[in-house]
Amino acid sequence: MKRLILVASIVLFAGNAFAQVTERDIVLRQRAQELMQRCNNGTAAYCMGIGDGFYRGWMEENGKRMNVPQSEPLSADFYSIACSKGIGKACGFAADTYMRLRDPSIPEQSVFAIAQKGCALDHNPSCRLAGEMSSKGIGTKVNELTALSYYTKACELGNESGCTLQKMTENIVELSHKKEEIDKSLRDLERANKILSDPDLNK
């Protein structure tokens, strides 16, 4: 939210200082401060509605349809606020959009945290996404066990792709654990061979 207000303020007072303005800048110039204030003071559902509005290009206000420029980045920003207010679906929408857009102003760690929040709120696509990010090391360290836990919850919540990924990851984890045991045995054998080959021990 602070990021949006800051950007909105810059755009509102910059005038023609920049030769080019982005899609988000244009939208923010129009109604950003008002909408952000309403969202901040409003309910999670209200913020979700604004996110939906920017995603589809129109929203309802006082029973009337109002056209707004379509903006996926802005929709994700409002979804993330709705997420922080407790709507799991909004978390999934925000995290998925940020992932697709690869917005450099949104750290990958923040996107992962949004997906985690959505999973905690029992939104199964958020659990699947958190698992994928854990598996690939996006916004967090690579950890197949963590990925497996997210896939398992996604599957339990009814996400079919989560179930598929759960089975695949179970095999990977099983194989990697076996490999770890083999590697450990080889390291132990190497240490034993070094000790046995020590000339001082053969005197």
Image: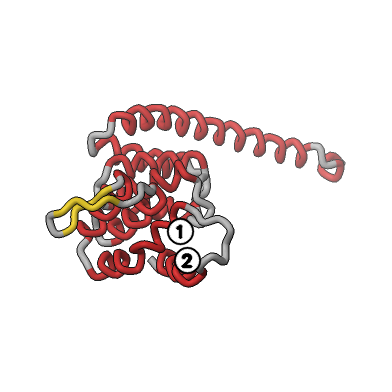
Q: Residues within 10 Å of mark 2 (few under 14, many from 20)?
A: many
11 or 135, which lies in front? 11
Please indicate, yes or no, whether residue 164 appears anywhere in the rendered image: yes
Query: Compared with residue 77, is residue 102 higher up or lower down, i.e. above or below?
Result: above
194 or 178, which lies in front? 178
Q: Any mark on residue 25, and which?
A: 1
The residue located at (43%, 51%) in the rendering is 112
Quarter of image, res 26:
bottom left
Indicate the position of residue 29 as horizontal and vertical percent values. 41, 63
Q: Do the residues labelled 1 and 2 touch (CB within 8 Å)?
A: yes
Q: How many marks?
A: 2
What residue type is disc 1 on? Asp
Q: Any mark on residue 92, and which?
A: none
- Dot 1 or dot 2: first in sequence order is 2
Q: Which quadrant of the rendered structure holds the C terminus?
A: top right
Q: Name the residue under label 2.
A: 11
The residue located at (71%, 36%) in the rendering is 190
Using residue 70 as the reference point, say whether residue 193 is left or right of it. Answer: right
Q: Is mark 1 on a helix, strand or loop?
A: helix
Indicate the position of residue 81 as horizontal and vertical percent values. 32, 60
Indicate the position of residue 50 as horizontal and vertical percent values. 27, 55
State the CA–CA distance, disc 1 to disc 2. 6 Å
